[in-house]
């Protein structure tokens, strides 16, 4: 049996289906209970699982992350929500100093099987501090996995895999596409393994590497560009990075662009370009082009469409690499 | 004994819910004109708020955080300040900010998503809006601390935040530093009972928020935040103490202004999911505007004719602010590169040039098509 769900409904469905099979899974955060989350990602969970498993916390992100670390170490599988990824920073110390390192520091005496979820990215005319893409922070941190789904099917499967993962996962949900399209999602829990990229569109001329909400304008650009046969690879997790998938696609095409909405400097584009250098230098026909957000603080809503890479900019980037 | 030293569970009031003086209360030492101004500003805030919510519903501004019900706390407290004092707001203090020199037009521009809305006028002693909850509290301590280190003794720094913010680490750290370094701060908590859907009693097991000050070594006092006169009086005393503490007194004060947000957390929120209309009605009986109006009319300071004139003036003022905000040209897209640094680094300059070339190639309309 499958249901046609949006991405945010798939989050809810993933949480519910895993909570039904594993009593240790609990959800906590700001407004996740009776209110069902500000994006309704936890809607109905409070009624189904009760106040001991779906918990409204005080307004304190360090508290939410830090207590989740303690609960995970003590055998629960907490899935804390931070209301917007822009509010993760009060919990940053807990994320990098403890959540990421508890296993390492304790030589596996204590582990931290938790999933920190947050709506992330821009494109919905949200107020200040509600639209940033900071996946690079977390990708940089050893001990964490970072998942960024781009479809409803993957969202449920990756969330289930993340909850079952023995290590901590940062689960960033691109809110621009929370409700932009539907997809059939099986009712029973299933896993989409973390660390496996997928090819969204096959092509032979150029590899386009992307993830999250940028998958949509990337696919649009790949269609629009017409005479260039573009392969669109959705990385799905920025850590573990699927080096084999990147290398395999690049060896076929010899040309690459990377698209992400996070700023350029120190972003995933640099990591992917260098991976190509390391793994497939002799196949390279042109420099790798990064099509990204600019190195400026995310602008307020009136200019955000100019900040985000859009199909025309991606198309230009593809042509530039082809014409090299 | 200072009124600030009262038991933090003993809520201070001057007007009761019907606008009558409570037994033994004294009207603050404010002239009639100022009292009527306060009334006008509260009415202005309410009218602005209603129009702003309506503009959001029509798609003319973005998400907006309403303040209805909270006018008494904002206007009462801000009137306790002298021109040289500062306010450090959260993101809901449109009324207090307006009194301190931020135009309603600018407030609208900010919530419309225009960068210019974030630029506080040079002459206003007003810090920038802080959206991340409680993050402005340490800034307020730092501003006040710097003033003290510079040898100034004539300025107080009033910081606004909500009940939810008291759960954040920044609240603790900001107040703790203020106590240790004895900074001239007034920490003003707009306890509006709800942090989106989480009620005040789920934020803390403390009986009051005011009593948290005890742990930092300074006074905490609870005031009826829907009583503008009581709010004025308490804030005035706290401001005076910040500048001229008595023997053995620390400069900072925590004020818990007990009030209620009549509307949603923001226009993106639906409070009917988590709270009863009966509760809202109960608090509406304490609405600060009719309370002050009753007091002013019954004491001969205000009449129907003046009220009508105030309403007419306010309508015009808000209509003008909206007109002016909507008449502004769309921001130039290159504005997002401005102010990142004092001097733009070469790599950023190159990105700006690439961006301009992209716009030239496509034109803005085609560029934003998808």
Image: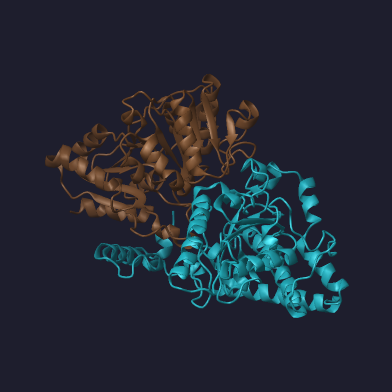
Q: Residue furthest top?
A: A21
- Residue at position x 61%, y 65% from top? B94
Up/down of A122 relative to A116, above or below = below
- The tint chain A carries is brown
Q: Residue furthest left?
A: A282
The residue lying toward the viewer, choosing from A179 and A37, is: A37
Q: Nearer the viewer, residue B297 or B146?
A: B146
Determine if residue A318 is in view.
Answer: no
Position of B4 with respect to A83 (left or right) is: right
Quadrant housing the N terminus of chain B: bottom right
Colour mapping = by chain
Where is residue B118? Give x, y as percent: 50, 67
Q: Which chain is cyan?
A: B
Q: Residue at x 64, y 60 (%)?
A: B58
Query: Is residue A92 shown above or below A320?
Result: above
Q: Which residue is painted at 70% across and 72% down in the image?
A: B41
Left or right of residue A241: residue B150: right
């Amino acid at each position: 049996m499958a249901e046609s769900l949006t991405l945010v409904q798939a989050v809810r469905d993933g949480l519910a289906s895993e909570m039904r099979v594993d009593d240790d899974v609990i959800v906590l955060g700001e407004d996740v209970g009776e209110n069902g989350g500000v994006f309704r990602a936890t809607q109905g969970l409070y009624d189904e699982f009760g106040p001991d498993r779906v918990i409204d916390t005080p307004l304190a992100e360090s508290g939410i992350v830090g207590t989740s670390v303690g609960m995970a170490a003590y055998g629960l599988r907490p899935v804390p929500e931070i209301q917007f990824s822009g509010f993760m920073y009060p919990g940053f110390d807990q994320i990098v100093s403890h959540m990421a390192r508890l296993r390492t520091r304790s030589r596996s005496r204590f582990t931290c099987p938790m999933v920190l979820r947050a709506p992330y990215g821009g494109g919905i005319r949200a107020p200040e501090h509600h639209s940033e893409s900071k996946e690079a922070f977390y990708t940089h941190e050893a001990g964490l996995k970072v998942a960024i789904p781009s479809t409803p099917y993957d969202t449920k499967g990756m969330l289930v895999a993340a909850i079952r993962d023995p290590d901590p996962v940062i689960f960033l949900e691109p809110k621009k596409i929370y409700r932009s399209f539907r997809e059939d999602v099986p009712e029973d829990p299933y896993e989409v393994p973390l660390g496996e990229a997928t090819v969204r569109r096959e092509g032979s001329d150029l590899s386009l590497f992307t993830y999250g909400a940028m998958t949509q304008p990337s696919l649009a650009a790949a269609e629009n560009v017409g005479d260039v046969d573009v392969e669109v690879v959705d990385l799905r997790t920025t850590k573990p990075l699927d080096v084999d998938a990147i290398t395999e696609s690049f060896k076929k095409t010899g040309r690459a662009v990377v698209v992400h909405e996070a700023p350029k400097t120190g972003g995933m584009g640099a990591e992917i370009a260098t991976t190509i250098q390391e793994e497939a230098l002799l196949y390279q026909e042109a420099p790798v082009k990064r099509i990204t957000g600019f190195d400026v603080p995310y602008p307020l809503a009136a200019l955000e469409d100019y900040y985000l890479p859009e199909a025309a900019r991606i198309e230009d980037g593809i042509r530039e690499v082809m014409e090299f | 004994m200072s009124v600030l030293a009262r038991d933090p569970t003993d809520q201070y009031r001057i007007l009761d819910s019907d606008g009558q003086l409570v037994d033994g209360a004294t009207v603050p030492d404010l002239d009639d004109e100022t009292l009527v101004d306060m009334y006008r500003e509260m009415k202005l805030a309410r009218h602005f708020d209603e129009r702003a919510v309506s503009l959001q519903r029509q798609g003319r501004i973005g998400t907006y955080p309403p303040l209805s019900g909270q006018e008494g706390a904002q206007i009462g407290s801000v009137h306790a300040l002298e021109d040289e004092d500062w306010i450090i707001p959260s993101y809901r203090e449109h009324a207090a900010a307006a009194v301190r020199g931020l135009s309603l037009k600018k407030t609208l521009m900010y919530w419309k998503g225009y960068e210019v809305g974030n630029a506080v006028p040079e002459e206003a002693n007003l810090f920038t809006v802080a959206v991340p909850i409680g993050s402005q509290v340490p800034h307020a301590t730092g501003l006040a601390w710097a003033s003290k280190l510079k040898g100034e003794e004539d300025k107080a720094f009033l910081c606004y935040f909500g009940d939810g913010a008291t759960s954040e680490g920044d609240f603790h750290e900001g107040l703790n530093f203020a106590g240790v370094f004895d900074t001239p701060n007034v920490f003003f908590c707009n306890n509006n009972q709800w942090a989106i859907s989480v009620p005040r009693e789920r934020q803390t097991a403390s009986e009051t928020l005011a009593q948290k000050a005890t742990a930092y070594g300074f006074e905490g006092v609870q005031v009826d935040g829907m009583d503008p006169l009581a709010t004025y009086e308490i804030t005035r005393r706290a401001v005076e103490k910040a500048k001229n503490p008595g023997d053995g007194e620390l400069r900072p004060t925590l004020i818990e202004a007990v009030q209620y947000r009549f509307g949603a957390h923001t226009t993106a929120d639906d409070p009917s999911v988590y709270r009863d209309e009966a509760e809202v009605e109960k608090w509406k009986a304490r609405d600060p505007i009719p309370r002050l109006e009753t007091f002013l009319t019954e004491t001969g300071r205000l009449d129907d004719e003046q009220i009508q004139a105030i309403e007419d003036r306010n309508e015009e003022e808000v209509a003008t602010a909206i007109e002016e905000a909507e008449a502004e040209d769309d921001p130039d897209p290159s504005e997002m590169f401005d102010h990142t640094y004092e001097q733009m680094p070469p790599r950023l300059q190159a990105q700006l040039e690439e961006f301009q070339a992209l716009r030239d190639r496509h034109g803005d309309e085609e560029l934003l098509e998808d």
